[in-house]
Amino acid sequence: GWEISPVAPLTGRLDVDVPDLAWTAGWIGPDAQAGGRLLGRVALTGTRREPTWEGRIDGTGLVIREPATGFEGTQGTLAISFRDHELRLEKFAFDAPWKPTGEAARAIGNVKRPERGTLSAEGAFNATTKKGEFRVKSAGYPVTQLTTRFLAVTGESKAQIDGPLIAVTGDLRADAGWFGVPASAAPTVADDVIVDRGEPLASTATSERIRL
């Protein structure tokens, strides 16, 4: 048989130009929305054994809306650079306005709230050592906004990668939160309905001998 030499030189280039990311919404959820543009160029050199990358990819006008969880991100930006064996997330940021529903707005009425919350991330990963670190910062960011709940958080979390191991730590606090309680109790079945859970049913009937 034959094979490619591990020291064979590599040369390649990847050009990225995605004018609209709306098609990625299906990866997020069935009713999700997405948007924005990606533009970049990455060059490949080195050998098959030790490939190296050089270039960057930038994203502008990024938008994410996921109605099932109430997560929203607007005015998003992305900047990823590649150099040698390292991928560096220079910037990944979103803004989101506070839009609590009527009940949530009344519940958190005395809370000082910003016009918009911010969410950002940065970090790096080395493909050779399989090690990296990523940090996520939040400042009054509304992570969920639904008619039944609202939660905005501030703080920082960190993910450290060492081969197959990932250690996540963080320090977050809630700026404002509200979780609605249903006005009525959960529905229940009538007393004469028997629920079959796959277990033998105990007999509740009684017998009586009648002498004729």
Image: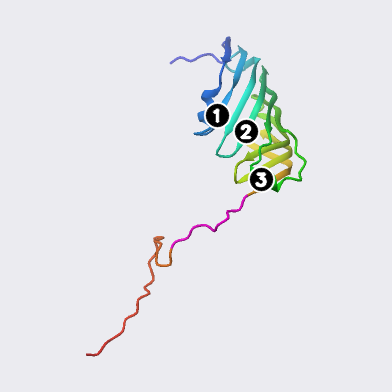
Residue drawn at (60%, 21%), measured in percent from left and top? 36
Please name the residue that numbered disc 3 is placed on. 104
For badge 2, the amino acid type reads Glu
From mark 3 to mark 1, how far is it between C-alphas?
24 Å
Provide the secondary structure element on which disc 3 rests: helix
Q: Which corner quadrant of the image does residue 154 belong to? A: top right
Up the image or down, 177 lies above or below 18; here it is below
For badge 1, the amino acid type reads Gln
Please name the residue that numbered disc 1 is placed on. 33
Up the image or down, 75 lies above or below 53; here it is below
Query: Which residue is outermost to the bottom?
Result: 212
Task: Give the residues drawn in magenta, as a range.
Answer: 180-189
> Do tag 2 and tag 3 residues touch (Cβ < 8 Å)?
no
What x and y, as percent, mark residue 76?
Answer: 66, 25
For badge 3, the amino acid type reads Ala
N-terminal label among 1 and 2: 1
Q: Is residue 186 magenta?
A: yes
Residue drawn at (39%, 61%), measured in percent from left and top? 196
| Quadrant of the snapshot with the N terminus | top left
